[in-house]
Amino acid sequence: MIRSAITLALTGLMAGPALAQDAFDMPVTAELLPGWIRQDGTRMAAVQLDLDPGWKTYWRAPGDAGIPPSFDWSRSRNLQSVAISWPRPIVFEENGMRSIGYADSLTIPVALTPEAAGEPLRVRLTMDIGICADICIPHRLEFDELVDGQDTRPTPAIAAALAQGPYSAQEAGVRSAKCTVEPTADGLRIEARISMPHAGGTEVVVIEPGLADVWVSEADTRRSGGEVIAVSEMIHTTGGPLALDRSQIRMTVLGSNHAVDVRGCTPG
């Protein structure tokens, strides 16, 4: 795995809005877009990343060859909760390995719920990402922004990123989602069968268990008539037992036309 082979551990520090590369001349710049206030009182903001040509970064489930991003909002003030909306990612196939992420630029919409509605938000975010070209580099971004204002007009870049998100199961015409789970010597084997129209091209399914500290293998995905079928192995990283809650399993079907976000499955 690339993740275990990283020997270059450059860590840059970026404060938003950050429009210039840092002292290490890292191939990424970052900015916190303040966005707008929605009718429910939440603020729709975004983290915007711009990558140099030939560089990419990763989705929340980046595959075996990717580096998962992480977000730490704990030092923020007047921030009750955060909901992240990921745009549809790209599937990269390189040297027989698959990773899932983004090239060129990425706008990640974040819905910020304040503790006190109408008051400014102090957004202090530490974001750890992986960026890759010929080498992979773990990189840290830090934002410290006072986000204020009562603008209700959507920011075009954020609205466009929201429009690039996956369809819900209902929107995509998913008829059923079933999972068969059986034990293996090391953990569990899961087979997901999703009855749905074709998402375009070669479909790739990503299965997320809804549990921390669980490694999930790259899904072996195929299409059989009206079903897309995906099989993965799951192993607890500490070697402990696994108890899956089917209602918490998340399956994302990535196609050339669109992506589909399927939440939960029934016994197969």
Image: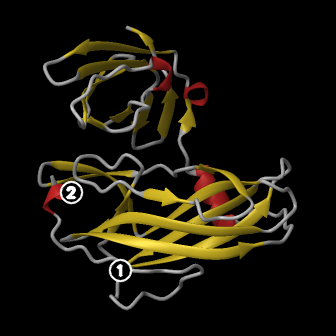
- The image quarter containing residue 198 is top left
Decide if residue 14 is on the left or right side of residue 146: left
Q: Look at 27% across and 51% down and name the residue there.
A: 99
Instruction: Report the residue marked by disc 1.
Output: 27
- 219 over 147 or under it: above or below: above
Tell me the residue at 46%/24% (across/down): 197
Query: In the rendered view, does 169 fall on the left or right side of 184?
Result: right
Q: Residue at x 44, y 32 (%)?
A: 210
Q: Is residue 224 above or below residue 120?
A: above
Determine which residue is flagged by label 2.
3
Query: Which residue is pictured at 65% across the width and 64% down the height?
Result: 76
**Image label count:** 2
Q: CA distance from mark 1 to mark 2?
A: 19 Å
Q: Nearer the viewer, residue 22 or 109?
A: 22
Q: Which color scheme did the rendering employ for the protein?
A: secondary structure
x and y, in percent, of residue 169 in the image: 55, 27
- Nearer mark to the viewer, of 1 and 2: 2
- The C terminus is located in which quarter? top left
Q: For the view shown, which residue lies furthest in the bottom direction?
A: 23
Query: Which tag, 1 or 2, sits closer to the chain's start?
Result: 2
Instruction: Give the crowd class for mark 1: few <14, some 14-19, many >=20 residues within 10 Å.
Output: some
Please state which amino acid type lies under the numbered disc 1.
Pro
Q: Regarding mark 1 in the picture, which secondary structure is present there? A: loop
Q: Position of residue 182 (x, y in %)?
A: 25, 12
